[in-house]
Image (spheres, grey):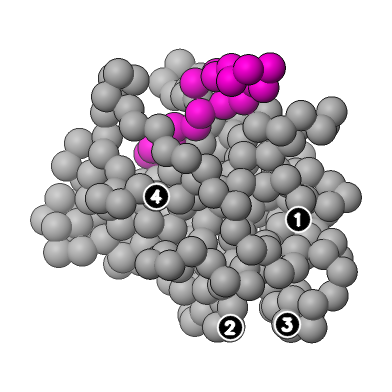
Amino acid sequence: MQAAEIVLAAIAPFVVGIVTQDALGREGRMLGTGTLIRFRDRNLVLTARHVLPYPQPDHVFFLPCPIGGLQISSAFEQARYHWRQRWNIMAVASDRDLDLAAMFLADGPPNTAYFNLDGARAPVPPPGAPVALLGYPIAKAKPILIGDLFGYAALPDFQCASPLDSIEIPGIRPFQFAIDYPESVVVAPTGYSGAIVWYNKAGLVTIDDLREGFNPEVYGIVTDHFPSCHALIGTKAGAIIGFLDQVADQARERLPKVV
């Protein structure tokens, strides 16, 4: 619990819930997860492409980390729901194959923390090492009805996991990774799409190490669930950086929203 609270405090400021329309255009019916990223001096929300409604993601709302941060609790009665926000999105770029999307913010909300994705990457943890993820699964959302409008009030969920040996996952592609997600231990992951999988850049994970400071690094982003393998599948950090390298300059030129 102490380790989880330290990790949660370090990553929660960067994580946002994403509330969108469903395939029928009904607002507030779909949930996903995004991460506030700074890349080449540009601020953006990184998520999975399938989280966003297309062809134009005009009905996207965000749930930022509340003031004071998040706390771990097993009781829904102690949960605090927060109002969703609409932010000024300048441009959206996506890659269907990698299942990635970047929403470039013209002017993000004040006092917002962005994770700097520039720079050299630390060695990734081996299979069995600890990683963590924070997201907004539908399983922890509260259905609400206001007049004739139905939607979800979303709550975040924090999980610890471990990378799996990718050669044991049928159908996994070279740019993808897998982490364990056994159904008997965790909530159904729908809504975790777009969540970053984090690890400690220093590589050491004892309580004393974490008290000295958890230095978060991006392992990759969740894009799929393979229940037969008890695994979440994602796109690796290297592929994310390659994607952002291609689209960051396009965002400055204000190209059409979907590229």
| Mark closer to the observer (3, 2) | 3
Q: Position of residue 3 (x, y in %)?
A: 21, 45
Badge 4: few (under 14), some or many (20 or more) residues near its Cα, within 10 Å?
Answer: some
* Three-letter residue code for mark 1: Leu
Q: Is residue 249 left or right of residue 77?
A: right
- The residue at the point 61 percent across, 35 percent down is 31
First along the sequence among labels 2 and 4: 2
Q: Nearer the viewer, residue 254 or 35?
A: 254
Q: What is the distance, in whole Å, between disc 1 and disc 4 at their CAs?
A: 27 Å
Q: Is residue 60 visible?
A: yes
**Which disc number belongs to residue 65?**
4
Highlighted magenta segment, given as a residue range: 142-160
Is residue 150 in the magenta section? yes
Q: Nearer the viewer, residue 136 or 117?
A: 136
First along the sequence among labels 1 and 4: 4
Q: Is residue 189 visible?
A: no
| Mark closer to the observer (2, 1) | 2
Secondary structure mostly seen in the magenta stretch: strand
